[in-house]
Image (tube, grey):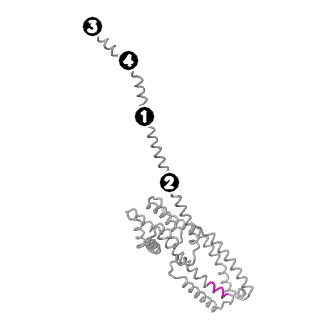
Amino acid sequence: MFGIDGTVLAFVVLAGFSAGAVAYAFLFNQITNEKQVGKRLETIKTAETDRSVVKASRDRVAEAAKRRKSVQDSLKDLEQKQKSKDLVVKKPPLKAQIRQAGMKVSLERFYIYSAVCGVALTAVAYFAGAPLLVLPGALLAGALGLPRWFVSFCRARRVKQFLNEFPNALDIIVRAVKSGLPLNDAIRLIANESPEPVKTEFRRIVDSQQMGLSIPDASLRMAETMPCTEASFFGIVIQIQSQAGGNLSEALGNLSRVLRDRKKMKAKVQALSMEAKASAVIIGALPFIVAFLVYLTSPNYIMPLFTTSTGNLILGCSGVWMSIGILVMRKMMNFDV
């Protein structure tokens, strides 16, 4: 019984193996095709993933190139505008210089003051006993020299006061923007709370905005009334940020840091050149000191320089050459930072 059951069982097993072999033989091609289809699908999925990655990378590169081109176009436009304004900023007319000096004087009244100054200086020279040939020079110096020098002095002093306070104003704008205030409110805060002349310059931006001008355009106009590179930097940063986007607080913070570094560099250059300036002052004052000491000890020895035509010619030539030397030394000691 066991032998019969074993034979039947072996027959059943062999029959099963035979059926499986026949089925595998018939289904081999189909299984192979299914495997190939699976591999193809996997390859297609991988290719699509790689294609999407490549496409995303291309999109990022294209976006970066587009943004770079936008920034370059903005810089080119600003450069063209800046070139057109450089002549007015570097060599402004007298009316613009008076405005940049913070003087509320009309051009006609300035000319009147210049004429009065020229007449007064001529009268002082006449009553001081100056020769008649000197009086026209005194008239020109009083009418054209002293008033314009005073305007230049007030202009330079106002720029210096602006540069001392401008980085602090930028820091206030950065804190205001980081706290959530819009840029126009931050500028209005500076226009109301900062000391002069920063207050006046930002007040002009606020007034221009109320008249319909945008903040970037109004900021670019600051260089017309404040002739310094730092004011131009501020207008360019606001203009680029408005056209290309970006973090305004970070840009203004970097500008503030750059302005402080420029100020430190100017102070360092001034300290390093102080020795040369002291030497130049000593050399320039030495002829006058020697002439005064000679006059105290031997007046008859030096008076021919002032009483004779030959002495006057020698003094004139000496003054011209000494002026040239002073200008050359001044040019050598002044550095643009």
User: For mark 4, what is the residue?
Assistant: 22
In the image, residue 177 above or below residue 11: below
Type of amino acid under label 1 = Glu
* Identity of the residue drawn at 47% across and 45% down: 55
Label 2 to label 4: alpha-carbon separation: 65 Å
Q: Is residue 152 magenta?
A: no
Mark 3 falls on what kind of element?
helix
Please identify, in this view, whether the residue under mark 4 or under mark 1 is nearer the observer: 4
- Horizontal relation, residue 199 to residue 305: left or right: left
Q: Does residue 273 sit above or below 53 in this rendering?
A: below
Q: Nearer the viewer, residue 325 or 63?
A: 63
What amino acid is at disc 3?
Ile
Of discs 3 and 4, which sits in the foreground? 4
Q: In terms of image quadrants, where is residue 324?
A: bottom right
SS of the residue under disc 2: helix
Q: Between marks 2 and 3, how big is the CA–CA gap?
A: 87 Å
Query: Would you name the residue on which mark 3 appears?
Result: 4
The front one of 116 and 43 is 43
Q: Which residue is mark 1?
A: 42
Residue under label 2, please give it. 66
Spatial CA span between label 4 and label 1: 30 Å
